[in-house]
Image: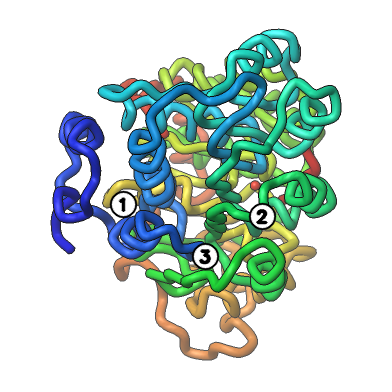
Amino acid sequence: MTTFSELGLAESLLRAITAEGYEAPTPIQAGVIPLLLKGEDVLGIAQTGTGKTAAFVLPMLEQLIARKGRPPAKACRALILTPTRELAAQIEDEIRRYSRFARISTAVIVGGVKPGPQVRTLSRGVDIVVATPGRLLDHLSTGALTLDAVVSVVLDEADQMLDLGFMPAIKRIGNLLPKARQTVLMSATMPAEIRRLAAQFQTDPKEVAVAPVSRPIEQIAQSVIAVGREEKRDVLARILSDRAVTRAIVFSRTKHGADKVCRHLRSAGLSATAIHGDKSQGQRNRALEEFRSGEAPILVATDIAARGIHVDDISHVINFELPDVAEIYVHRIGRTARAGQSGIAVSLCSPEEVKQLRAIERLTGSRLRRDGAAAEALPTDSGSDRGAKKSGPSGRHGGHRPAGKGGEAAGRRRHKPRPSAGRGAGERMSA
């Protein structure tokens, strides 16, 4: 299948797709859309940045357009569950763009904001609800919303929702859904828990897997720098002061750590902002807007951003701390090299994190290039994939200087990228 017109989508959707500048579906879209249009349950596995959202949004819109009529009051016809507020907002943005020539109503139901406006929107009935599980259950318990009219359900980033402990909430929601429905699970990885989830919520699901599970995309040049834990913040500031870093996400394991790193970068003269689960929704929205606009081209984040933030033109991802779960590394670095572009991922590894580094290299099947004067302190193989192929082009230095005087000289430089429009389990987040 080479064009969207071959998929059998409504003319209004094809007009919107053309307006977005897309001509051919991605592999996940070409595999999932025809199955969903046939009414099948689908388990879709694909890496971040491959067009998974459009793969389930377009057939959902097609089915809603064909149904016509208004949804009942305090009800919805389609439900999309996501792990983070940011991802919910971005999914609704895609729905609006693809339905611009159709009459489709939506509601975003997330925590961190007052429930009143959400209740008023739901009272009229909406076609699609995009929600995080916690706030959705709040509205279900008060009767502000019922799920009796739902014909289509999507669990997006299903593996992350499992990691974040949403399973009890998802099971409660599942018990309130009609038996006769179409259910879609979209995931970037395929742990055994996802198989069990599919068996519980789906009927004879068709699996579509278009890329090796948990393998970083080829356009990302990956490297690791050996550094002591106490020196990490200074090394990070030197890396980010390089002019090659136009827009970067820095990942920290903890909320408190993210705030400390952000303060250190600001004290070094760099424009940075932080986002994590303890921030209010207004603070999170402002941080993202500053990041997208270039006012703060450095975003320090916990794993709330590993799969919940889609911004174009992110040149670098820096792992200030390596994640305890190797799969999260793949999702973190997937924030760069989107839409066919290249990107750079740099990890700072202290002696206490060598175990995590080995786990990452075993999972990805590749050895991260060692950079910096202390590179010899790092293990020379992954522990099980001795001699694995290096990732990234040979001799590429990832757009940053090792620690040294060159980096120091640029340490006070402010830089802003061109503005662009854009489209996590290290912490538990309120929904």
Q: Which residue is mark 3?
A: 43
Q: Nearer the viewer, mark 1 or mark 2?
A: 2
Q: Which residue is mark 1?
A: 342
**Label 2 Cα crowd, 10 Å radius (few <14 / some 14-19 / many 20+):** few
> Could you tell me which secondary element the residue under label 3 belongs to?
strand
* Residue at the image position 26 percent from the left and 23 percent from the top: 101
Q: Which mark is residue 179?
A: 2
* Residue at the image position 45 percent from the left and 63 percent from the top: 40
Q: Nearer the viewer, mark 2 or mark 3?
A: 2
In the picture shown, does residue 2 fall above or below 427? below
Instruction: For marks 2 and 3, give the CA distance.
Output: 18 Å
Colour logic = rainbow
Instruction: For marks 1 and 3, give the CA distance.
Output: 28 Å
| Residue 157 image offset from top left, x and y in percent | 58, 52
Q: Is residue 260 visible?
A: no
Earlier in the chain: of badge 1 and badge 2, it is 2
> Could you tell me which secondary element the residue under label 2 belongs to?
loop
Earlier in the chain: of badge 1 and badge 3, it is 3
| Residue 45 image offset from top left, x and y in percent | 48, 65
**Label 3 Cα crowd, 10 Å radius (few <14 / some 14-19 / many 20+):** many
In the picture shown, does residue 368 fall above or below 226? below
> Which residue type carries mark 2?
Lys
* Residue at the image position 73 percent from the left and 57 percent from the top: 162
In the picture shown, does residue 219 fall above or below 301? below
